[in-house]
Image (cartoon, rainbow, N blue to C red):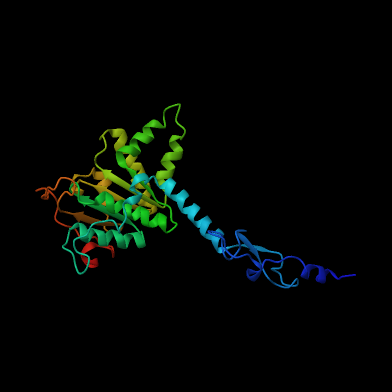
Amino acid sequence: MESLNDVLRRAQVVRREDLPEPDGETCGICGGAGYLRYDVTPDDPRFGQIIACECTRRDLERKRIERLMEKSNLGPLQRLTFESFIRKVKEGTPPARSPDAAWKVARTYAENPQGWLILWGTFGTGKTHLAAAVANYRVSSGEPAVFIVVPDLLDHLRSTFSPTSDVTYDELFETVRNTPLLILDDLGTQTSTAWAQEKLYQILNHRYNSALSTVITTNLSPDEIEPRLRSRIGDGHLSTLCEIRGVDTRLGISHQPRQNAPAPRKPSRRLREDDRL
């Protein structure tokens, strides 16, 4: 009578050399099975265990990133990446407050999003593109991010009070408050009602107290932002303020800084613009 070890030794074990030749898109490692078993002796603790093939791991990672992208709310803005941003100065030091200088600051932030990044300046200078590029970079790296336009956020919060809403107010509000990386686009273009200001304050105050990574774009100068929000956005220990000046790429108009705009401010964080350029 065969011993148990002999029977187990004759059991089928997937070996790379035993697999059929790859056929079209069939994986050349697992032959399309998706999983492998360790080719070890029966006394090895791993005997009989299965592991995911490289093709399965790649597929699972692709699906995970797809789910993150769906939750990111980027939609058509997935095309806005750092690579697709048109720069005039690709080598050397770009002019301060230029879109190229802001690209460097945003690209550095995307690699390690700590604290807040505030992109402020005139219309059409690439603020939304850079903010979306940060989100796309993080999602492509397998990290969660949520991109939302501020007026749309407030509309969504209002709509949750409808009896036909599929999402509860608390669910949406908590998602925005606590997502690891939140990108708020076009702060200041929302309807300035007391309710809207209070919701924004609650979101940003929570993220400020929790030091959650946040990117904000705005056409307002820091002095024009509502005082409670300004005190948090302007905290140099948490925020990097990056002003962008230039030609409106949509209209071809050169915007001049407003006369009441504050002098450029150098945040104390290591990512401040003048240190990086």
Place of residue 11 in the rendered image (x, y in percent of width and height, measured from the top left): 76, 66
What residue is shown at x 34% (from left), y 34% (from top)?
155
User: From this viewpoint, is residue 210 visible?
Assistant: yes
User: From this viewpoint, is residue 231 visible?
Assistant: no
Closer to the camera, 101 or 87?
Answer: 87
Q: Is residue 236 above or below residue 160?
A: below
Closer to the camera, 237 or 259?
Answer: 259
Which residue is outermost to the left? 259
Q: Quadrant of residue 134?
A: bottom left
Image quadrant in which the N terminus is located: bottom right
Q: Is residue 206 above or below residue 277?
A: above
Q: Is residue 7 left or right of residue 95?
A: right
Place of residue 165 in the rendered image (x, y in percent of width and height, measured from the top left): 44, 30
Place of residue 74 in the rendered image (x, y in percent of width and height, measured from the top left): 37, 46
What residue is shown at x 27% (from left), y 49% (from top)?
128
Closer to the camera, 72 or 232?
Answer: 72
Q: Is residue 146 left or right of residue 7?
A: left
